[in-house]
Image (spheres, helix red, strand yellow):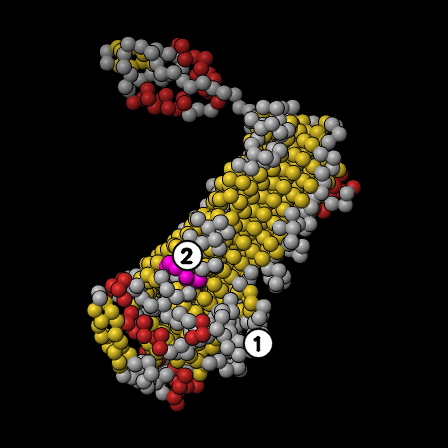
Amino acid sequence: MQGVGKMKYNKSYLARRLALSLIIGGMFVSSAYALPQGGAVVGGGSNGNIGGSGNVMDITGTGSNNVAIKWEQFNIANGETVNFKNMANVLNYVTGNTKSEIYGTLNGQNVNVFLLNPNGILFGKGAAVNVGSLHASTGKMTDAAINGFNGTPAIDLSSVTADVLNLGAIRADKVTIEGANISLGNAADIKKQNGDAIAAADQANYILKAEGTINVGYETIGTKNISIIENGVSTEHAIRDYSAGAAEKGSTLFTGKKLNGSEANNINDCMLISDIYELQSIQDNRAGRYMLIKDIDGATTKNWNSGAGFKTLFNDSALKFIGVFDGAGYTISDLYINSSTGKYGGLFGVSAGKIANVQLSGIDYNFTGGIEAIGGIVGYNVGSNGGLAGSVRNVQASGKITASNLIAVFVHIGGIVGTNASTVAGASGTPTPTNAMCIIKDAVSKVDITASGNTNIYAGGIAGNNSYSEVYNETGVIENVKNEGAISVTDSSQAKTGGIVGNNAGQVSKAENKGAVTGTWHVGGILGYSNNSKNTAVINSELYNSGTVTGIGVFSYVGGIVGQVFQGKFDDLSNGGAVTVNATNTGYAGGIIGHNSSTNSSGSFTNLSNSGAITGNVTNAGYAGGIFGENDAALEFEKFNNSGTIKGNGWIGGIIGYNNGGAIKNSYNTGVVAGTGAGALQLLVGGIVGNNNSGSVTNVYNTGAVSADKGTSTKTCFAGGIIAGNKGSIKNAYNMSSVTVENGAIGKGIVAAGNGTITNAFYFNPSTQRYYDYDGAEYTSTEAFNQSFMEGAAASGEQAAWLGYSDGQTTPQLQAFLSPLDVSIGNIEVEITDGDIYTGLAQAIIDKLTAMGVEFDASKIKAVEVKEAGTYDLSSLLYSTQDGYKITIGDGGKLTVTVNAKKPEVPPVDPPIGPSVINDAAYQAALINIQHADDDLRVVQQTLEPEKYAEDEDGRVKIMGTGIKI
């Protein structure tokens, strides 16, 4: 078994590291809340005992007044209680990677309790906190600061990203809350420790510090009626009067500050909403500030307004929402909208306000006609010339959106927002640049979207259109989001469909798609189409797709991440989903990008990886590649790798199907690349590139099998281990796999056709088990090949790009993919028997590194086998996988192998043969003794065994020969 110590997966792709900071309940099932786990008293000048039983935990100080505790997680479930006793100040610092969820009781009579969790803190509904003072923060502390805790923690608030949300009851004489954003339920739920209400005079003791928004709910005074048509009948419902007065507001009870503690921050006093009728009524005040106080059941909306359902709020660009709406983590369920009128659809139509902490469950939206923008939460999230920019954060939506019989020229549909950062018609006054960002952040969509009937449908799991406004210099920003809904657009010849965004002109980062994406024209696992030509500084990064991506239609651009890039910069992209293009004319299929346009002159692409299967089924012209289907831009590409199987007809490559002018560097392919002759194009199948037209390929290798089947094609078909058709250059490349051809196709180990230049290129022939360079020179061992290849790389000035193994542990590896790992573990001594092979070196290294607390991925540590006695440098035996480590032996450690002589083999002893059954205990003991004797005795036993016999005489047993006599 491999080491299980502090392991760390080395890849940085989003799939391994996306950590949505959603704080609202129900977004993710975190560790089942239970009493705090993994606690250790580490400082504060006091010892402490962590005890209790059942649902109660008692933490008792045994020394001075200050106690500091590190926790792996700090949660309290409903019905559980944590008590702090016999101390003045206690610091609870969470070192794990999950937020704290408090639904139970936290007691500390006259104790100043500090709870710090950089991942976020939620005091859920039903939580009861009763302490001397409470300091809840998502800031960070160093180990030295924790260990030296003296009652006043040294908290670093410079990089706070997580929020604090309170829906419970807090009793404390002082409260300080610090987070990126803060939301507090009813202000009246925070009182002094003795239960008295806090007043304006206490404001200095109740401090809320956030860099973002601070929302505090309050109760209005008075009611009014709202009329709703239900089941065909107009009915009256009593609701809160949001134009009436109020009880105490948060802004009069709390002090709002920025995280630096010196700047003031506004506290948004939010009116409370408790049912679906009150939710519908907020339409009357577009600048209002609102907060949910409970879950809202919207099932009745299916019977509203003669089947039209809930009326989208603020469905007018001239009267957009500019207030605050805080869902406070509560759920609005089963909201129904069925509309054939209006331009904007969703819970909100048009918003330049602040929307946060909203959960929509089971939405059912149906739109037809002239609708232009549909979102699960907001149709248009916009900016305005008043300097406002809409934001949607910490939200989730599930259910379905159906749009059909659409007649508008453009229709934008998203699981969260229809269009993000578009300045809509109807804004008054002279446009003023705001340099603002319309933001969608920390969002999850589980909304299935189906759309048809328009030539320009932009659909995405998060947003249909993420835009850029030149008028206001506003950029649409989407960050830390995930989609799990299925997105399908049909009957639209010019659709742009993406797992996250259909059409992107803004910035998208930290995004993951798991839903199936199907569309016509431009289709991508993350972005259907991307054009950052108006804001070229934007980098779209950390994007990961695992959903299936399918393109259909006459022309189709399909990519695991982006269907087509017109212009833009991209970094750290990974696809694991199957990508398929089914086009009746021309189709592009890429594990990352379907087609990179020639217009992308200022773009960049680094660190791209595909493991999904890529399939091109194209009637006319097909392009398929592990990373790009086709590249037409003269850019330099760095750190590309593919392990997925690539199949298709046309121009097919492990990295790029057709490369027109691009410079590929430091890249490799391990996936199978297979082509079948069909369509209008000549079949060109290459381990790295199918057709390389004036591009360069430098520092690359291929280990995936390459094959070409000419089939019924009348055109010449080629297969090459590196490139099939080369009109560019190849430098420092090798192919380790087979190249097979059928039905008259032509295959070669490096290049099959073309007049491009080739420098320092090699291939391995599996049939002969030999290496060959392009000129035909033969190398009989990996050591010899490595030496020649590295000499060639040095001559070209590219030696630093490669890690060569002079002892032949493996073929050269690309250093760009390797992380440093020092193996300073001393010497290792082992004994083996002559003829045996020592195979345990890698595991011995893993065990030692694990015991030392080193963070690493054990699966990437490899070692050669040893069978000869001697002392070996560990550096000559260890190596790693390509996505692993550059191993150094800092202490010069060695392996010493001692080979012991092989012991003679002794066959097992046969039992006595005779007519009598021998059951005497002494005889059985003798046999056992004999069988456990040393080797010499067993040899003697073997030679004398025929003399043994047994006989039954007068009830007595005699064992003759070497036996015993009784």
Residue drawn at (49%, 74%), measured in percent from left and top?
Answer: 427
Which residue is pictured at 40% across the width and 18% down the height? 909
State the separation of the CA atoms marked 1 and 2: 34 Å
Which residues are drawn in magenta? 367-375
Q: Decide: few, some or many residues near mark 1? Use Cα within 10 Å; few <14, some 14-19, many ≥20.
A: few
Residue 877 colored in magenta in the image: no
**Relative height, residue 609 to residue 219 (above, below):** above
Residue 374 drawn in magenta? yes
362 versus 202 height, above or below:
above
Up-down: is 243 above or below 620?
Answer: below
Q: Amino acid at mark 1?
A: Thr
Q: Quadrant of residue 957?
A: top left
Q: Residue at x 43, y 16 (%)?
A: 941
Residue 842 is situated, as x and y percent measured from the top left of the image, at 56, 40
Given this view, does label 1 or label 2 mark the residue nearer the observer? 2
Relative placement, left or right, of 22 versus 305 is right
- What residue is rendered at 69% in x and 50% in y? 634
Q: Which percent across, then down, holds residue 524?
A: 51, 50
In the displayed structure image, the side of residue 130 where residue 693 appears, left or right: right
Q: Residue furthest right?
A: 795
Residue where numbered disc 1 is placed: 432
Residue closer to the observer: 97 or 402: 402
Q: Are marks 1 and 2 in contact (CB under 8 Å)?
A: no
Identify the residue under disc 2.
406
| Element type where label 2 sits in the image | strand
Indicate the position of residue 783 as horizontal and vertical percent values. 69, 33
Task: Check the image and report above or below for 820 versus 217.
Answer: above
- Specify the amino acid type for callout 2: Leu
Can residue 380 be seen here? yes
Answer with left or right where residue 888 lies relative to residue 429.
Answer: right
Q: Quadrant of the C terminus?
A: top left
